[in-house]
Image: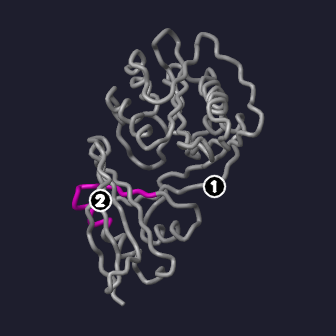
C-alpha cells in the first residue's frame, strides 16, 4: 500500500520557535508515522532546527522513515536552515538509521540519576559567597542579575554543533519560569552571590507537579571569573537538600552532561549521580 505525507499545522507555537509537521498515512488514511521540525526564531540559532521522527513499529522497514526524513530536510532547506539535529539512543535502530543517511555525531550526552533515598554528600561552603533559593519566577530584585548570570552557559561544550550566543533578557527569564508553572510543574533555583543582589552562578531543577517520580535538572552555570572554587558543587549539593525538603516523595534527580564536560561530570560523580544511558545528538549539515 502506498504511503502519502500530509503537511500539518502544528499548534505548538512558542515566542522563540514554531513547528512544522508531517503525517505519514496509508491510502485509507491510517496514520503510520510522523515528523516534526522545530524552527528557531532567534537570530543566533536560526541556522539550526531540531526534529522528531516516529514510525509505528509494525510499519518499519518500508521506507516510511526515509520519506519523512526527506520531508524534514526539504522543509529545513525551504526555511534557510543549515543544520538539522536530533537526539537518539546510542547504538539504537534510530542511531543506525541516521548514520546510514549521513548524519554525523554532533555530541554525546551522558544521562545520570541521583537516588534521593541515599544520604546527601557533605560539601563545604565556599568562602566569600552565599546561597539564595527561590521557587518559580525569579524575584524582581534579582531578575537582572540572574539574567546576566546566564552568560555562564555561553561557553558550555556543544561538540561539533555550531551555536551562537543565546541572548536572554529579563522578560525571557520570567517567561521561561511561567511556562513551567502554567503546565503544573515546579521550578526550584539555587543561586550563588558574591555580594548582595549579585548572582554569579545558579542551578535549576524542575519537579513534576505531583512531587513524585524523578525531577529534571535544567541548567547549571558559573560565570568564568568565579570558576574553580567549588561553587557548582556547593550549589548542586544545596539543590539536593532543598528538593528533598520541599518534595519528600520525590524519587530522584536526572541530569544530562556532554561527555567532554569533565568538570561537571566530576561534580555529578561526587554528589552520587550514577550514569544511566547515553544519547547521540546527530546532525546533518545541509
Residue occupied by mark 1:
277
- Secondary structure at badge 2 equals loop
Residue 9 sits above or below residue 208 on the image? below
Left/right placement of residue 20 relative to residue 249 reads left
- Name the residue rendered at 77%, 34% in the picture: 119
Residue occupied by mark 2:
10
Q: Are marks 1 and 2 in contact (CB under 8 Å)?
A: no
Quarter of the image where one finds residue 31:
bottom left
- Residue 88 location, x and y as percent? 51, 61
Q: Nearer the viewer, residue 208 or 62?
A: 208
Left/right placement of residue 276 relative to residue 5 reads right
Quarter of the image where one finds residue 33:
bottom left
Q: Which residues are magenta?
A: 72-86
Cα gap from disc 1 to disc 2, whole angstroms = 31 Å
Left/right placement of residue 84 relative to residue 199 reads left
Residue 79 sits above or below residue 172 on the image? below
Amino acid at each position: 500500500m502506498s504511503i502519502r505525507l500530509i503537511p500539518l499545522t502544528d499548534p505548538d507555537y512558542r515566542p522563540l520557535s514554531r513547528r512544522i509537521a508531517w503525517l505519514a498515512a496509508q491510502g485509507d488514511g491510517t496514520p503510520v508515522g510522523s515528523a516534526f521540525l522545530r524552527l528557531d526564531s532567534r537570530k543566533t540559532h536560526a541556522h539550526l532546527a531540531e526534529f522528531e521522527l516516529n514510525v509505528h513499529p509494525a510499519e518499519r522497514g518500508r521506507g516510511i522513515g526515509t520519506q519523512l526524513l526527506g520531508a524534514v530536510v526539504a522543509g529545513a532547506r525551504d526555511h534557510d536552515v543549515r543544520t538539522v539535529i536530533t537526539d537518539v539512543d546510542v547504538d539504537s535502530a534510530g542511531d543506525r538509521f541516521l548514520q546510514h543517511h549521513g548524519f554525523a555525531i554532533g555530541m554525546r550526552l551522558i544521562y545520570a540519576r541521583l537516588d534521593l533515598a541515599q544520604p546527601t554528600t557533605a560539601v563545604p561552603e565556599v568562602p566569600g559567597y552565599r546561597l539564595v533559593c527561590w521557587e518559580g519566577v525569579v524575584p524582581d530584585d534579582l531578575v537582572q542579575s540572574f539574567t546576566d548570570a546566564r552568560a555562564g552557559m555561553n561557553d558550555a561544550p556543544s561538540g561539533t554543533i555550531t551555536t551562537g550566543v543565546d541572548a536572554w533578557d529579563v522578560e525571557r527569564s520570567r517567561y521561561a519560569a511561567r511556562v513551567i508553572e502554567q503546565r503544573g510543574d515546579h521550578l526550584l533555583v539555587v543561586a550563588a552571590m558574591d555580594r548582595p543582589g549579585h548572582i554569579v552562578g545558579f542551578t535549576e531543577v524542575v519537579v513534576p507537579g505531583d512531587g513524585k517520580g524523578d525531577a529534571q535538572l535544567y541548567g547549571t552555570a558559573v560565570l568564568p571569573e568565579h570558576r574553580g572554587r567549588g561553587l557548582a558543587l556547593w550549589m548542586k549539593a544545596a539543590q539536593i537538600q532543598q528538593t528533598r525538603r520541599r518534595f519528600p516523595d520525590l524519587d530522584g534527580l536526572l541530569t544530562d552532561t556532554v561527555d567532554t564536560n569533565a568538570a561537571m561530570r566530576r561534580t555529578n560523580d561526587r554528589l552520587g549521580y550514577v550514569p544511566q544511558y547515553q544519547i547521540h545528538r546527530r546532525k546533518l549539515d545541509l
